[in-house]
């Protein structure tokens, strides 16, 4: 194993104008990578002379093309580079291709720090997590109760010693075709954040009854059977298009960039919509909106707020057969929030 590295305060790193190559190990989840766009922009502003490259997980690597500050991407596949040994090999592969002055390691995992260390960068910067401090040259404790965007930015502040301003979370999607549509997403990776079957039906029915907006239902290939069953059980499918399983993630981003408003669970697509300037109405169950809500102001957060277990931040509901924090949401409140967002968008256009 590599020897223990002495922690180095931010003041000892190279002058920002002398830093030539920076590598950022991006987060592994779709929503987290979207939120990290603010970090990439802040790094580019602080190090204007540097070339910024990124390591991205296969499957969400397309997002790197929507960060104008990024020059090159290294796509990491866990299936191809398995375990700690695989992470080390991938880092060594990068080391052979290019030398870096700084690697910012945004994921908290031990393996991501191993990968960063293997690059041979002069500075390896990250948070003290998973007993990985000895792999980092610059390691810091994470502050509590910060939004994920601010957690990433605070790492840059701690390392640089600078007062780094908080940019908006932004994905550049040039040429997106604007359409008068409402996108609805009832899915999420975690069961505790996903709308149960009956609730998804009743909520879409309520929105359909109270709006004339064209509605598009979305979902990934694995979510298609669930969305299909919800679609088939609706009171009416008039003005509703089911596109679940019919879009790749890049195509989904284009779809969201062109819509008017999005109604969504706490999920990656909600972050995508918010990052392309679409007003996003987000239904929160287990997730903690203080830490992981879509970051930009163009959003409406809806939470039940009546249960002592909220938010549990668990991937499955430990107390009920279905997450009551979602099943008890007032459908009319949700519908009114969607209508208000649509009217606001209409007034602004």
Image (spheres, rainbow, N blue to C red):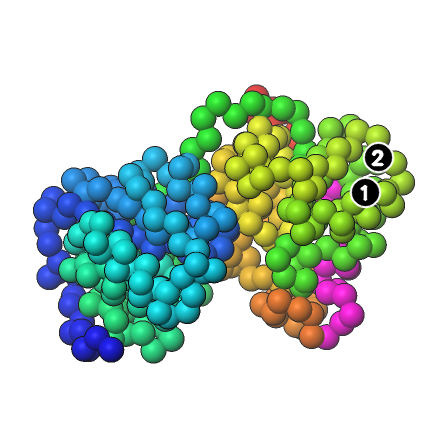
Position in image of residue 46 (x %, y %): 21, 45
- What are the residue bounds of the magenta stretch? 319-337
Residue position for label 1: 231
Question: Which residue is rendered at x = 49% and y = 35% of the image?
Answer: 276
- The answer to whether 143 is drawn above or below residue 242 in the figure is below
Position in image of residue 201 (x %, y %): 82, 48
Is 339 placed left or right of 15 in the picture? right
Residue position for label 2: 237
Question: Which residue is rendered at x = 57% and y = 28% of the image?
Answer: 258
Question: Which residue is rendered at x = 37% and y = 39% of the image?
Answer: 67
Position in image of residue 65 (x %, y %): 40, 37
Can see residue 188? yes
Residue at the right extreme of this rendering? 235
Asked whether the beta carbons under mark 1 and mark 2 sit within 8 Å of each other, the answer is yes
C-alpha span from label 1 to label 2? 7 Å
Q: How many marks?
A: 2
Position in image of residue 43 (x %, y %): 26, 47
In which quadrant of the rendered image does the N terminus lie? bottom left
């Amino acid at each position: 194993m590599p020897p223990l590295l002495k922690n180095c305060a931010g003041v000892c790193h190279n002058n920002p104008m002398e830093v030539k190559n920076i590598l950022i190990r991006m987060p592994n989840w779709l929503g987290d990578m979207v939120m990290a766009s603010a970090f990439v922009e802040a790094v580019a502003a602080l190090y204007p002379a540097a070339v910024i490259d990124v390591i991205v997980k296969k499957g969400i690597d397309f997002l790197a093309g929507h960060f104008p500050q990024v020059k090159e991407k290294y796509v990491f596949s866990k299936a191809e580079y398995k375990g700690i040994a695989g992470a080390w090999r991938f880092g060594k592969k990068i080391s052979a291709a290019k030398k870096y002055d700084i690697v910012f390691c945004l994921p908290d995992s031990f393996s991501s720090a191993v990968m960063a260390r293997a690059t041979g960068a002069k500075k390896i910067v990250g948070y003290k997590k998973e007993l990985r401090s000895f792999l980092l040259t610059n390691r810091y404790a994470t502050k509590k109760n910060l939004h994920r965007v601010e957690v990433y930015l605070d790492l840059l502040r701690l390392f640089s010693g600078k007062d780094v301003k908080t940019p908006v979370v932004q994905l550049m999607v040039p040429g997106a075709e604007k359409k008068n549509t409402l996108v609805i997403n009832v899915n999420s990776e975690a069961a505790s954040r996903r709308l149960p079957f009956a609730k998804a039906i009743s909520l879409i029915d309520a929105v359909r009854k109270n709006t004339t907006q064209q509605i598009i239902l979305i979902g990934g290939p694995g979510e298609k059977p669930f969305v299909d069953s919800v679609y088939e059980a609706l009171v009416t499918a008039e003005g509703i298009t089911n596109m679940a399983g019919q879009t790749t993630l890049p195509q989904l981003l284009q779809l969201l960039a062109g819509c008017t408003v999005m109604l969504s669970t706490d999920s990656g697509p909600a972050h995508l919509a918010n990052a392309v300037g679409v007003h996003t109405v987000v239904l929160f169950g287990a997730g903690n909106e203080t830490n992981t809500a879509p970051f930009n102001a163009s959003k409406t957060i809806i939470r039940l707020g009546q249960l002592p277990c909220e938010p549990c931040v668990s991937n499955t509901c430990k107390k009920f057969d279905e997450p009551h924090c979602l099943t008890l949401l007032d459908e009319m409140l949700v519908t009114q929030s969607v209508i208000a967002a649509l009217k606001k968008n209409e007034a602004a256009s």
